[in-house]
Amino acid sequence: MLFLAEGVPEDPNPIIPIWQEIVVGTVAFALLCWVLMKFVFPRMEETFKARVEAIEGGIQRAEARQAEAEALHQQYQRQLAEARTEAAKIRDQARADANGIREDILVQAREESERVIAAGREQLDAQRASIVRELRAEVGTLAVDLASRIVGESLADEARRKGTVDRFLADLETVAR
């Protein structure tokens, strides 16, 4: 309803704003932009720069630590390789020492065995010689007694008896050979 009479304003058009509102809105927007540009944006820029620097610094520190860790890893690998080489040398040396000790023990055992065998042979030879002497004496005595009984006369003469026994034993030895 349009009332044009009596000074009542007509209804404003809802599509076209009132000019006073446009001026107030523009001034408020300009004031808001000025406050944001003067105070808020510089602080945000400082915060962003600090964050970027912190991130880049963290990345650089991480790269430095990564490089340090890689260097330590390489050093560890070198030390491990050296330790393995040294262990192999020690193991080879120990084997060589063990073989040397084994050879020394075998040589000593052979020498001891040969010494024991030689001592045993000497003892056997001494016992054999003693037994042969005893047997000769006994065989001689038995032979003289037997001969005395067979012949019927006494072969009591020691020198004659000894010569007869020695001849008899010598004849036996030549026959046995």
Image (cartoon, helix red, strand yellow):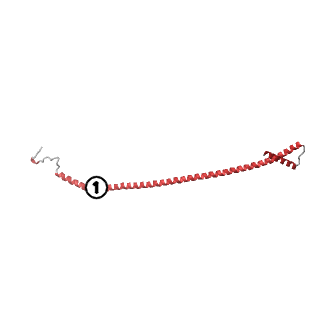
Find residue 18 and report its horizontal and vertical position in percent.
16, 50
**Which residue in the protein does label 1 denote?**
41
Q: Nearer the viewer, residue 84 or 24?
A: 84
Amino acid found under the numbered disc labelled 1 = Phe
Left or right placement of residue 27 versus residue 5 in this view: right
Find residue 161 and report its horizontal and vertical position in percent.
86, 48
Q: Nearer the viewer, residue 3 or 172?
A: 172
Find residue 35 and report its horizontal and vertical position in percent.
25, 56
Q: Residue 77: in sight, yes or no? A: yes
Q: Residues within 10 Å of mark 1 (few under 14, many from 20)?
A: few
Q: Residue 173: in sight, yes or no? A: no
Tell me which residue sits at (65%, 51%) in the image: 107
Local secondary structure at mark 1: helix
Find residue 100 and report its horizontal and vertical position in percent.
61, 53
Tell me which residue sits at (48%, 53%) in the image: 77
Left or right placement of residue 108 versus residue 11 in this view: right
Q: How many marks?
A: 1
Tell me which residue sits at (77%, 47%) in the image: 128
Rendered image quadrant of residue 153: top right
